[in-house]
Amino acid sequence: MRQRMLQTGIMEGSSFEVSLTLALEAAPRFGLEPRNAKRTVARMAKVVHENWRKDFRAAGASSHETQAFVPAFEHRAMELALSLQ
């Protein structure tokens, strides 16, 4: 599996790791209320989770091609995002 790293940190002094926790902690710096940021993440995650395979098929991707993208859409960060309220 490919290492997921950001090219720039989300906040000054933060790591370059891909982290939903860090992104949510940074929400106020971008004018977002933490509660609204969590709801937005959960809503977006639900849409992606429920539709990515169908959208790949609609775009003409084969089962093999679709399977190759599973790690990009089904991972711990997605589970965390889906669990937010």
Image (tube, helix red, strand yellow):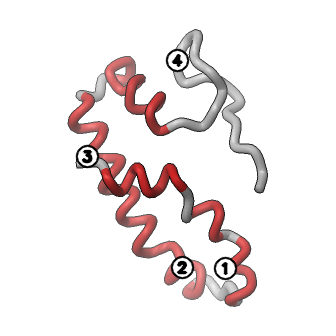
Position of residue 17 measured from the top left corner of the image (x, y, whole percent): 64, 32
Mark with earlier residue (4, 3):
4
The answer to the question of whether label 4 and label 2 lie on touching residues, with beta carbons closer than 8 A, is no
Q: Is residue 60 above or below residue 29?
A: below
- Using residue 54 as the reference point, say whether residue 65 is left or right of it: right
C-alpha separation, residue under disc 1 versus residue under disc 4? 34 Å
Give the spatial CA distance, label 2 vs label 3: 23 Å
Q: Residue at x 29, y 48 (%)?
A: 84
Rendering coords of residue 34 (x, y %) = 26, 30
**Residue 55 in the image: above or below residue 62:** above
Residue bearing the label numbered 3: 39
Q: Residue at x 54, y 24 (%)?
A: 10
Residue type of the residue flagged with mark 2: Arg
Q: Residue at x 71, y 30 (%)?
A: 7
Mark positioned earlier in the residue sequence (2 or 3)? 3
- What kind of element bears circle 3? helix
- In the picture of the structure, the residue carrying the numbered disc 4 is 11
Determine which of the numbered discs, if any, sits on residue 53 in the image: 2
- Whichever of callouts 1 and 4 sits on the residue coming sooner in the sequence is 4
